Image (spheres, rainbow, N blue to C red):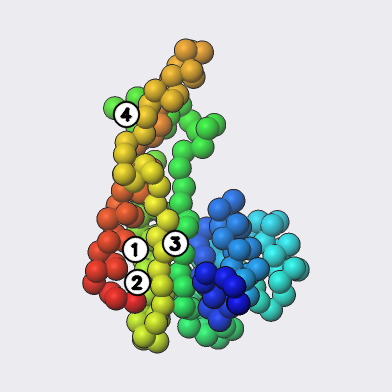
């Protein structure tokens, strides 16, 4: 578009974690700039129906489990049928322990559950890895594309547990869980590897 820093009007943008708050914002931003957008998530929120109604044929929602490669391959095949090869991938999908998580998830590090660690790392790190493989391969075949991996400030520094001191003063045993920061650090490192080696 004339007068804008970036013209994305011809792009086919795949955004994972489409039903979440950031995913919805990213999708709307690209749609408003004329891109065709594919939202990918394991579940479809009510906000997705609003996007479908507002943007019509410019928007497509696909259900997929990013932690399963076969699910992503099937998702890509449907996208190729409807829109063609994606030109942009935004790896936005991520999970963290919510404020109301079980006490063992937000308690001291020594008691953090192994199953919680596995779930966060599976979505945040493995999901990003598999999405890069599947959608990145389609971009490499077309010899064009951009991948944006969404990390976090916690990918660079450990959580400042003093932020949550007010909760401990009220008698809660609350610590920011370790898995989110570890997974986002991995996403940041993976991004450097992807850009150095793929050149897409």
* Local crowd size for mark 4, using a 10 Å CA cut-off: few (<14), some (14–19), many (≥20): some
**Residue 38 in view, yes or no:** no
Q: Where is residue 98 in the image (x, y as percent from the top left)?
A: 51, 37
In the image, 12 versus 173, the foreground residue is 12
* Local crowd size for mark 1, using a 10 Å CA cut-off: few (<14), some (14–19), many (≥20): many
- The answer to whether mark 1 and mark 3 are in CB contact below 8 A is no
Residue at horizontal 46%, vertical 51%? 94
Which label number is shown at residue 87?
A: none
Q: Where is residue 138 in the image (x, y as percent from the top left)?
A: 40, 81
Q: Where is residue 14 in the image (x, y as percent from the top left)?
A: 51, 70
Task: State which tag comes first along the sequence, 4 or 1.
Answer: 4
What SS does tag 2 mark? helix
C-alpha gap between disc 4 and disc 2:
32 Å
* Residue that badge 1 annotates: 129
C-alpha gap between disc 1 and disc 3:
9 Å
Residue farthest to the right, as pictured:
53
What SS does tag 4 mark? helix
Of circles 4 and 3, the one toward us is 3
* Residue that badge 2 annotates: 133
C-alpha gap between disc 3 and disc 2:
12 Å
- The answer to whether mark 1 and mark 2 are in CB contact below 8 A is yes
């Amino acid at each position: 578009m004339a007068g804008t820093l970036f013209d994305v009007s011809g792009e086919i943008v795949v955004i994972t974690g489409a039903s979440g708050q950031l995913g919805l914002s990213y999708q709307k931003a690209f749609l408003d700039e004329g891109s065709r957008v594919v939202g990918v998530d394991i579940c479809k929120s009510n906000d997705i129906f609003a996007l479908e109604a507002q943007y019509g044929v410019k928007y497509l929602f696909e259900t997929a489990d990013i932690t399963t490669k076969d699910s992503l391959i099937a998702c890509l095949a449907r996208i190729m049928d409807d829109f063609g090869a994606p030109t942009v991938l935004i790896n936005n999908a991520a999970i963290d322990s919510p404020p109301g998580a079980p006490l063992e998830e937000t308690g001291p590090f020594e008691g953090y559950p192994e199953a919680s660690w596995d779930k966060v790392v599976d979505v945040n790190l493995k999901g990003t890895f598999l999405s890069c493989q599947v959608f990145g391969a389609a971009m490499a075949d077309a010899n064009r594309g951009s991948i944006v991996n969404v990390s976090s400030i916690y990918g660079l520094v450990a959580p400042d547990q003093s932020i949550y001191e007010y909760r401990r003063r009220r008698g809660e045993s609350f610590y920011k869980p370790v898995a989110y920061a570890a997974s986002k650090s991995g996403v940041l490192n993976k991004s450097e590897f992807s850009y150095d080696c793929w050149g897409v």
